[in-house]
Image (spheres, rainbow, N blue to C red):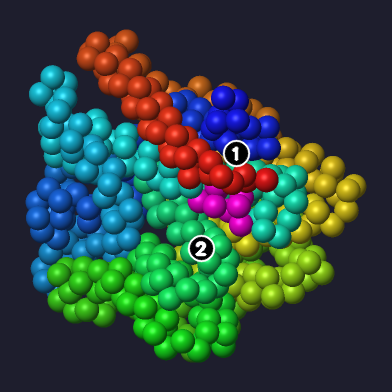
Amino acid sequence: MLLKMPLLFRTANRSIALLILAFFLGSIFLLKPRFGGDGFSYYAWLRSIAIDHDVDFTNEYEQYNTYGYWTAVDWSAPTDKPANPFSIGPALLWAPWFVLASLLTLLLGGTLQLANDGYSFFYQILIPFGSLIYSLLGSLLLYRLLQRFFSRAASTIALSGTVFGLMLLNYLFNESVSSHPLSFFCITALYAYWFHSDRFEQPIDSFFGGLLAGLMVLVRWQHAIFLLPIGIIYLLCNRNLFAWLLFGLGFSLLAIWQLIAWKALYGNYLYLPQGQEFFIPLSDVRTWASRIPLLLFSPNHGLFYWHPLALIALFGIFMLWWKNRELCLWSLILFVLSICVNSIVWEYYGGWSFGARRLTELLPFFAFGLAALWESSAKLLKIGRHITFIAIGWNILLLLQFIGRQIDPAGPLQFPAWLWGQVTGIRFIREAIGQSAVFSNLYYGLTQDSAFYIQSFLTVVLFTTLFLALIFFLSWRERDESYG
């Protein structure tokens, strides 16, 4: 009987069990029920198509934008509809959670007096929860991917630092309704499948790889750069024309929906919704190049300034040369390409942002670097545990400052005030917990309407049920395998 226990809870998989537990506790104590910032407009695609059956965002931007989040309501598309410069990929990934929220609202909405308008209780908790689950799945896939090249100990430390010690932490719980956790999931899923299928060895693998690639680009268009290693290796090593066609078919089946969305909203299949003024002219190489060091080292959301662990990860990528030269080379090339692409916009710092949020796309490759560094010697592996623990703690304290607005979310860190804030910012843990779905509903139950007690209880029950279903599914899938 013991042999049939879920593999996730066998000793060899305690790291995975702890990871799932961390995500579960985060969903209960920290997950914020909010469509805020850019996420408000990303979600507008899904809500408008599903509820209003159109791509006119007037009511989303004006009627339902209670907190005055930034939208493109002042930007008029050529079709005279309010513009939406954000991609449609997140809407596709949130669709299953939207359907579940719709069903629950139809079932319980009358009792709880909930409007089935896309913004009521179940939508507010399940869309952020969906992003959290995608982040968890991305983490599990990354862990398996790391174990193809590194020891379990090095993989565990690297994964922990990557997920909780860098910018992703904010987009797990505080701002889940955004493209960044979905970017992490899609890029990791594509590369995990690339290696798992031995570089799309079978023609059917090419088709599914194309689907994953299409989904990745659909989430953020700039992710096309991550097709470069796969495309070059695939073309050089696979001379099967049928496999190429299958990959192209899978890619087109998903990527085409962005073109269709642009056509419906802007009147053209190919369109630059942000406008040319959003980007630094390619001819202005000097200005463009000046943004690169700022993107990396500036107090204004510079990658290494906000998250020093990323600099350690970059050093580890160079160390990867002695472990896997191909992986090292492509990780460095993608790092350079990502830096170049993200520095070509005038607002290089990303506006309202926890660190260099647009560079979340590099996290799987930072994980390779961290794992390579920690595995290079037994002494470094031991040191790596301590560094990772410190980096995670430092990142949590910085996030608490971010949540409490002790630092400017849209501006630079002010030295030395922000360093002192790493000590005093611990007080914002109450605010972080108080803004979560469970405890905000509990608070409203205490101060306004006892019906919110029911919503708080339903949130706990729903999150617990969905996590147990995920554990059961993963255990079933892994019953003949082990994560190592």
Asked if residue 124 lies left or right of residue 421, the reply is left
For the residue marked with disc 1, what is the amino acid? Ile
Residue 21, position as x, y percentages in the image: 55, 30
Instruction: Please give the name of the residue rendered at 46% of the width and 87% of the height, measured from the top-left corner.
Output: 240
Which element type, helix, strand or loop, lies under badge 2? helix
Q: Are marks 1 and 2 in contact (CB under 8 Å)?
A: no
Instruction: Please give the name of the residue rendered at 38% of the width and 22% of the height, measured from the top-left corner.
Output: 460
385 drawn magenta: no
Please state which of residues 420 and 170 is positioned toward the viewer in this rendering.
170
Q: Which mark is residue 6?
A: none
Please state which of residues 346 and 342 is positioned toward the viewer in this rendering.
342
Q: Where the N terminus falls, by quadrant?
A: top right
Please state which of residues 316 and 444 is positioned toward the viewer in this rendering.
316
143 drawn magenta: yes
Q: Is residue 389 above or below residue 58?
A: above
Instruction: Please give the name of the residue rendered at 75% of the width and 51% of the height, measured from the top-left corner.
Output: 151
Tag 2 residue: 193
Q: Residues within 10 Å of mark 1 (few under 14, many from 20)?
A: some
Q: Which mark is residue 16?
A: 1
In terms of image quadrants, where is residue 263?
A: bottom left
Instruction: Please give the name of the residue rendered at 79% of the width and 52% of the height, measured from the top-left corner.
Output: 374
Which element type, helix, strand or loop, lies under badge 1? helix
For the residue marked with disc 2, what is the amino acid? Tyr
Q: Determine if residue 457 is in view.
A: yes
Secondary structure mainly formed by the magenta segment:
helix
Q: Is residue 424 above or below residue 129?
A: above
Please tell me which of labels 1 and 2 falls first in the chain.
Answer: 1
Q: Where the C terminus falls, by quadrant?
A: top right
Direction front: furthest residue: 1
Residue 34, position as x, y percentages in the image: 33, 38
Magenta span covers which residues? 138-145
Q: Residues within 10 Å of mark 2 (few under 14, many from 20)?
A: some
